[in-house]
Image (cartoon, grey):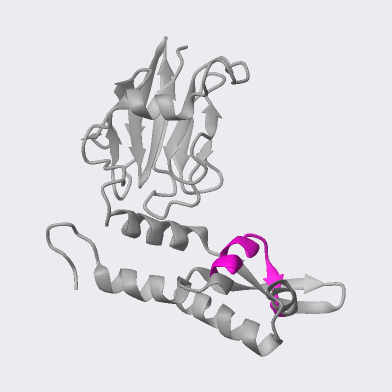
Amino acid sequence: MQAAATGIDFDFLAEQLAPLGNPKRLHLLHFLRRPHYLEEVASELGLARYAAQRHLEQLVEIGVVQKVPGTRPTGAVTDYLLVPQRLFSISEEFAMLGSFRVDASSAPDTRLLTRAVEPAPAKAAPKKKGPALVLVHGRDPGTRFALAGPGPWTVGRDDGQTISLDYDPFASGRHAELRLKGEQFLLVDAFSRNGTTLNGDPVAKGEPVPVDAGDVIGIGKSLLVMQGHV
């Protein structure tokens, strides 16, 4: 069942959240950020192998954990590893249920967004100089991506990008590009699947648009704020 007004797929969300409603499995989401095989999982949870296997199977079934080949000094093993893209998709769908979700379809209040990532002057370490993109919605909000050198800087899901949003399945492999022309930054959508936004407005594919300090760039479900000047 999907709510037409909200676009929320309630069936999908219920199917994903039901297996996650267990403290042992929630613990595994944290533990499996690095690959571990069955015996290590059982030891971490304090369970017998068969019980640990049942928890793992439910997480594999909904796609938040995957099996990958691994090796140990004793030989080949089957490792289990978190799939961050899948977990991010579930969290985005769940966030749509409440008004706390950042809505990239409307222009965000950039004053609030930038204030959220800038520490209080009295307690903070000295601010790093130079222009940067700061992640304000996504994994690890507050992450600062320095824009050093002449550019260009690519943004996307692939590891090879200057700014890699590898956790965001809604971002294309090479989603967008930032260029520097004189003292002006330019944003270009690299013909991405889901498009790019600037302050909530769609950016025409392949057409450079100016970006200034305080502007909010939407890539997939992630939001980045431009800070600083050339």
Question: Residue placed farthest to the right in the image?
Answer: 73
Residue 54, can we see it? yes
Residue 168 in picture, x, y percent from top left = 43, 51
Q: Is residue 98 left or right of residue 42?
A: left
Residue 91 in picture, x, y percent from top left = 40, 57
The relative height of residue 91 versus residue 125 in the rendered view (above or below) is below
Residue located at (63% from left, 65% from top): 32
Quarter of the image where the N terminus is located = bottom left
Nearest to the observer: residue 60 or residue 76 = 60
Question: Residue placed farthest to the front in the image?
Answer: 122
Nearest to the observer: residue 20 or residue 1 = 20
On the image, which quarter does residue 203 sit in? top left
Residue located at (70% from left, 86% from top): 49
Residue 182 in picture, x, y percent from top left = 42, 10
Q: Could you tell me how many numbered marks the image carries?
A: 0
Question: Residue placed farthest to the bottom in the image?
Answer: 50
The boundaries of the magenta stretch are 26-38
Residue 209 in picture, x, y percent from top left = 29, 24
Nearest to the observer: residue 80 or residue 159 = 80
On the image, which quarter does residue 219 sit in? top left
